[in-house]
Amino acid sequence: LRDGVDPFAPPKPSDFATSIQPFAGGPAGLLAELTHRCPLQCPYCSNPLELEKSNVELTAAQWGETFRQAAAIGALQLHLSGGEPTARRDLEEILAAAVEAGLYTNLVTSAVLLTRERLERLAGIGLDHVQVSIQDIVPESADRISAYDGGVPKKRDVARWTRELGMGLTINAPMHRQNIAHLPQIIDFAVEVDAQRIEIAHIQYYAWAQVNRAALIPTREIFMETVGIVEDAKKRLQGVLNFDFVIHDHYATRPKQCTGGWGRSIMAVTPSGKALPCHAAQTLPGLTFDDVRERALGDIWRNGAAFNAYRGTDWMKEPCRSCERREIDYGGCRCQAFAVTGDAAATDPACHLSPDHARFAAWAETESIAAPPPFVYRRYGGAPQGA
Ligand code: SF4
Ligand code: FES
């Protein structure tokens, strides 16, 4: 904890009081996508279908300036993400700038490129927390989902080293029909490696996950089983492991407050320096994104066109406009609304009040009982690959 703030706790409405009104307060968190390069090819990757090349990536000095500005406008947490952030050879320099800026630092990693020596160096610089993503815990399945061989033992090592080196540890496990049967073992793994927190997140269907939706979507019955497994584990592991469970939108009745509400608590920056109100915002049409090298971060946050496009409630249509929950969930996810309805200002179809909700749920019911098609893997520097 820094200044008594747990950066990984789910947001409370009071957290937004300073950042929503006015937006003079900055984002609470910055998601820095240091690179889109990644040795894995997860078929649900949230990176855009068109990945940015390494020759357009911000330099360590440019990231450092971005972090200083973020801290100056109130950001507390920094998520060093990607792609795979450890693919940056200058990660140490980037991290040092973040520590110098006074940010709580979280490395979001697949772990497969990390050695103990490098992790020790990062810990020595001041890294606070590591989030290790796992594709599955059964090696053959994990290898197939990530299109990368031998990841599971590496993740186990990195998770253990993280705790031995005194850093916080979260295990992040995206859930879908091809790993969901192993959820109990995934929870056991988190306990075994002494994680403090596990994030069990049913997939959000935009970007690569939308391409692979039919291969990923579970049946309603299986989704409901995961709810029971997580509820039981929460009771059994109280005081041992904290759970963050993201439910499956197709089987929900109400949407999530995506990214804490558009332009209210998070800013994402792409490898080339585009500032986004949510990491998938580039899937939406008609938005232009400011470059952090060309415009001050505070100005982008307060006045940037993309940040104001769906901020607050003025942009809403019915049924959100007159709904009593409009300042609780802010109409749900803009990216999902656009992906399903073609209208980024529509009500998130996860909401039972959305006119598209029945169609949205029916897709899931139909696709989830058919045989899964082969994955279309994300591929850096080339066309998508099937397998
Ligand atoms: Fe939220 Fe809109 Fe649904 Fe109301 S109608 S619950 S504001 S998504
Ligand atoms: Fe973009 Fe939800 S992922 S608003």
Image: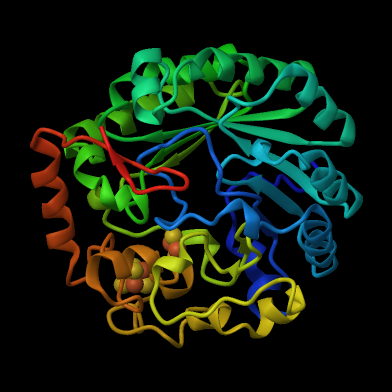
Which residue is at 63% across, 62% downward? 272
Image quarter of residue 346:
bottom left
Quarter of the image with the N terminus is: top right
Which residue is at 34% across, 24% downward? 144
| Mark count | 0
Ligand 1's image quarter is bottom left
Left or right of 290, for residue 382:
left
Which residue is at 60% across, 35% downward? 109
Question: Is there any visible trace of residue 62 in the rendered image?
Answer: yes
Image quarter of residue 146:
top left
**Relative to 315, is 84 above or below?**
above
Query: Residue 207 appears at what percent x and percent y?
Result: 37, 55
Query: Residue 163 appears at what percent x and percent y?
Result: 73, 19
Nearest the camera: 226 or 118? 118
Query: Residue 365 appears at what percent x and percent y?
Result: 12, 45
Question: Is there any visible trace of residue 332 in the rendered image?
Answer: no
Query: Which color scheme is applied?
Result: rainbow
Quarter of the image with the C terminus is: top left
